[in-house]
Amino acid sequence: MVRVDKLAKVYCSGATRQVVFEALSFAVERGEVVALVGASGSGKTTLLNLISGIDSPDSGSVSLDGVEVTALAEPERTLLRRRRVGFVFQFFNLIPTLTVGENVALPLELLGEGDTAAQQRAADLLQEVGLAGLSPRYPETLSGGEQQRAAIARALAHRPALLLADEPTGNLDEDSGGRIIELLTGLARRQHTTMLLVTHSVHVAAAADRVLHLRHGCLAAS
């Protein structure tokens, strides 16, 4: 599903040159849940941005489901993300002026799904994540754990081939975080969605099929 080949990314600021990756290569198989573990500043979020085409590498390539992301123009990368990638963030990123149901239905509406079908899909997912009946509420009225459940529903609404989760429990307490990871991995597996999960927690990483450790721009499996 994901193939990264000899990826290089360097940030320059004046005379300072920060090498994030020089020749990073790895693959994630279809349907696999892979945890990416590393210290703060090790480049985990940068790697997700490169895989999704939000950022571009200095050299090397990224392929997603057979499509070379790094060969696409920005409009094509945007469409690829909209159709094939779901995102779960640490800080939920729900749109505050939309209801919970509208937030979940939004990815489908952006793809041209009819209102009735989008609303039904949103209702079904909200029930699956334990938020049945909360569709008319606004994000600010929900707890942190409830907001992350809504964010998970939104990320999976359009049945993405790849789910990228960036520290999805980082803004939650340990108990809530554990329940969120169980929910997230369970839903991804039931939908046969490939997931790359960024975390600094070994407990969160334990829920994955495989763990990759990012250190000094290199990956090591465990």
Image (cartoon, rainbow, N blue to C red):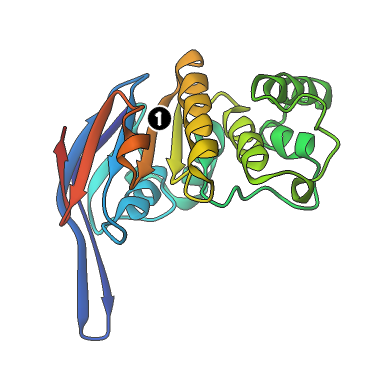
The quadrant of the picture occupied by the C terminus is top left
The residue indicated by pointer 1 is 195
In the image, residue 30 sits, relative to residue 176, either above or below, namely above
Which of 151 and 174 lies nearest the eye of the viewer? Answer: 174
Q: Indicate left or right for 197 with 101 as reference.
A: left
Task: Farthest residue to the bottom: give it.
Answer: 14
In the image, residue 90 sits, relative to residue 66, either above or below, namely below
The quadrant of the picture occupied by the N terminus is top left
The residue lying at 75 percent from left, 46 percent from top is 139
The residue lying at 57 percent from left, 52 percent from top is 91
The residue lying at 73 percent from left, 28 percent from top is 131
Which of 63 and 137 lies nearest the eye of the viewer? Answer: 137
| Position in image of residue 125 (x %, y %) | 67, 22
- Whether residue 84 appears in this view of the structure is no
Q: Indicate left or right for 206 with 220 as reference.
A: right
Q: Indicate left or right for 50 with 176 as reference.
A: left
Quarter-of-image position of residue 59:
bottom left
Q: How many marks?
A: 1
- Whether residue 86 appears in this view of the structure is yes
Quarter-of-image position of residue 198:
top left
The residue lying at 76 percent from left, 51 percent from top is 140
Which of 192 and 114 lies nearest the eye of the viewer? Answer: 192
Q: Secondary structure at mark 1?
A: strand
| Position in image of residue 208 (x %, y %) | 33, 27
Q: Indicate left or right for 106 with 26 as reference.
A: right
| Position in image of residue 96 (x %, y %) | 75, 52
Which of 67 and 182 lies nearest the eye of the viewer? Answer: 182
| Position in image of residue 177 (x %, y %) | 50, 38
Local crowd size for mark 1, using a 10 Å CA cut-off: few (<14), some (14–19), many (≥20): many
Q: The disc labelled 1 sits on which kind of residue? A: Met
